[in-house]
Every structure is written in structure tokens, then in C-alpha cells.
Image (cartoon, rainbow, N blue to C red):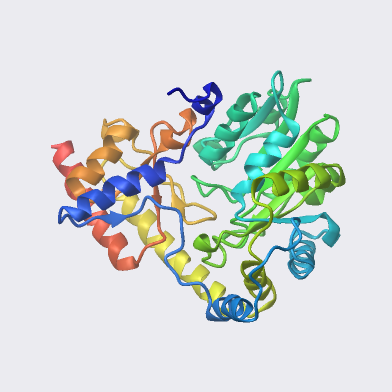
Amino acid sequence: MRLAGHYERLGTERAFEVLARAKALEAQGRNVIHLEIGEPDFDTPPHVVEAGARALREGHTHYCPAPGLPELREAAAEHLSRTRRLTVDPARVLVAPGAKWFLFFGVLAVAGEGDEVIYPNPGYPIYESAINWSGATAVPLPITEETGFAFTAADLAERLTPRTRMVILNSPANPTGGALDRELNAEIAEILAGHDCWILTDEVYSELLYEGVHDSIASHGLLDRTILLDGFSKTYAMTGWRLGYAAVPPDLIEPLSRFLINSVACTAPAVQLAGVAALTGPHDAIDAMVAEFVRRRQVLVDGLNRLPGVSCVMPRGAFYAFPNVTATGIDERTLATRMLDEAGVAVLAGTDFGAHGAGHIRLSYANSLENLQEALDQMSGLLEAVAV
């Protein structure tokens, strides 16, 4: 039996493949330190868990409006307005089972055969996957170490054409930890103001920024053309709850609502009420998590810079380091494989995030300080043996 031809256009996330390989090694009795998967190693805050459990006990177990519960749409609109220096109408907020939903269907709503979509590379793999599935041409925007893992306004301008239907931005970024500052966003906004295209800004790591103040491209007069995406997985350690939201342009509310009805019908209402508690409740657990990530970031980056043939820029946000490993003399994919097989440290090759990730590997510091130090020791042993 054959599969549909368009299935082959779908990409994947190598993090889950490497995780599966690491779990198989653990099943054989090997010890593996997991630095490959991108999720906080913290529990969901207790008041959020209780809100979800209470909603289940109270019978919030049935269908609800496809765009989302009014309570969550209002809380999300208030949160976006306050943190992005905007005025967001709750009617523009849509809710979905995970932020990834908006990446995929946001592209499908506006792009197709003959169109182009610009996306960051290296970047989250689902960007390119969604673009390819839509039939549009994926146009990589190189994210470079020389620009602090950002890009220049000129880099973007030279890739815009009359066929550009969407520009995807991500700040703070996966896999690099880079961020777009307000000055660069102002330059980008000036360029995009004169071009007829949509914008999708992925800001799921917005509260995991350790240097500077988060800035959104939407706050530069482009809200009516921008899908402003956020979610709960990273900030509130809710990856398994599957809950995301976005402020969307008026012209995309109906198309994206129709995609919701056709794909998932609605997002679990009890999960949405937990999301309300996350946005409106105490922030103590998040502050503690961010403080711990700051400590881990310092330990990991300092340790990476002491490894033979490795140099690492200090990431500004998210919980990833993206060290340059070209001086080891081993290509990034071979090195990632050897790190797992020989050192027992699961990492990802930079090219798992696009061709412009060559010469780098990605490590998540969403793991304990003890495990990070052990991982550094194991990697040092491998690289020192290679250097000899």
C-alpha cells in the first residue's frame, strides 16, 4: 500500500528520535544524561495543577467553543497587552492544544504553491516542515554566531520578494538562545511595513530571557499583520498539558477557527482553566525556575568553553546552548552521535535545525547542575581522547 506523496514533505523533530535512542541505551543498562529534549525539568506549579484538577471535578469535561474559553482568551489578551506594550482585544485571541498548532496552520492559512516563506535557520524544525507541507518555498534566513545568533535587517531585506507571503521570527530562539532587541525589530518593522506579507512571531520563550527586555515585532505597528504566538509549555513547565494561544490578525480569525474545528474541535476546557490560573496566579515558581536556569547557563557555558575545540557564545534566552565545535575536527552529526554512544550524553547536531546549524551542537540546560557537570566531564574525556 502506498502513502500520499505529500506525506514525504513533512519533516520531524530529531530531539524525539535522539530521545528514543537514548532511552533504548538506558534500557540496556547504560547511564545517559539527557541534554537533547527541550522541556523544563520542573513540575507544573501546584496552583495550576489544582486548577486543572478542580475543573475536572466540577465537570469541565465536554466540548467548548473552538476559539477557546472566554476566561482564557481574556487572560491571554491581558497578558499579551501588558508584556508586549500593546492593546490586544480578547476577540483576537485563539486557543489551541499546543503552540505548535499555530505554527503549522498559520502557514497553511496564508501560503501555498508559488509562494515563499522566510524562516530562521537554524531554527525550530517545524517551521520548515510546515512550509514544505504547504507547497510554498522555504527561504532560510541565516542565524549567525557573528550577529549574536540573530541576523541583520539587510539579511531579511535581500530575501523579500513579491512572492513572500510570510516571515517567521523567533525570539528568544530555539536552538541558539539568541534574541532580537528593540533596535533590530524597529529596523525589521520599517522594512516589512512596505512589503505585503504576514508575520508569525514565535515568542514561547519570552519569559525566559536573561539579558535585556523582551521585545515583540508586533509592538512596532504590525499587530494587524502578525500572528503573535505564546504558550504554557516552557514558562509554566506544562509541556504535557498541550496548551498554546495566539493573538491573530482580524482577517485570520475565521480561517484559523475553521482549521481548529476541522482538526481538534476544541482544546480541553479543564486544561484551559489551568491556563487561566497560570496567567493570573502567583509567579514565584516561575521566578525560581528562571533563577535556576541562570545558574545552569553560567556553569554550562563556562564548562563548554573549557572543552578542547569548543567555543560557546552566552545564550540570552530559552534554555539552550549552541556551541561551535568546528575546531574539534569532527562534524557536528558525528560528534553528537559519539557523545551519546561513547560519553553517554544526549545532544543534538546543529544541522538538526537546518543547514546553517553546521559546525554546532545544541545542548539543553533543563537538567540539574549535578548532571550538567557530569555531562561536561564525560564530554571532556571524549574530546581529550580525540585531541590526542
Q: Quadrant of the N terminus?
A: top left
Question: x, y percentage for residue 84?
Answer: 76, 59
Please indicate, yes or no, whether residue 217 appears anywhere in the rendered image. no
Residue under the point 55% across and 72% down? 286
275 relative to 18 in the view: left or right: right
Looking at the picture, does residue 23 appear above or below residue 115? below
Observer-nearest residue: 388 or 78?
Answer: 78
Residue under the point 59% across and 56% down? 205
174 relative to 326 in the view: left or right: right
Question: x, y percentage for residue 28?
Answer: 16, 52
Please indicate, yes or no, whether residue 232 appears anywhere in the rendered image. yes
Question: x, y percentage for residue 120?
Answer: 59, 36
Looking at the picture, does residue 214 appear above or below residue 176? below
- In the image, farthest residue toward the top: 114
When asked about the image quadrant of residue 154, the answer is: top right
Observer-nearest residue: 90 or 344?
Answer: 90
When asked about the image quadrant of residue 267, the answer is: bottom right
Residue under the point 26% across and 30% down? 329
Residue under the point 60% across and 62% down? 232
Looking at the picture, does residue 385 appear above or below residue 345? above
Question: x, y percentage for residue 156?
Answer: 68, 30
Q: How many marks?
A: 0
Q: Quadrant of the C terminus?
A: top left
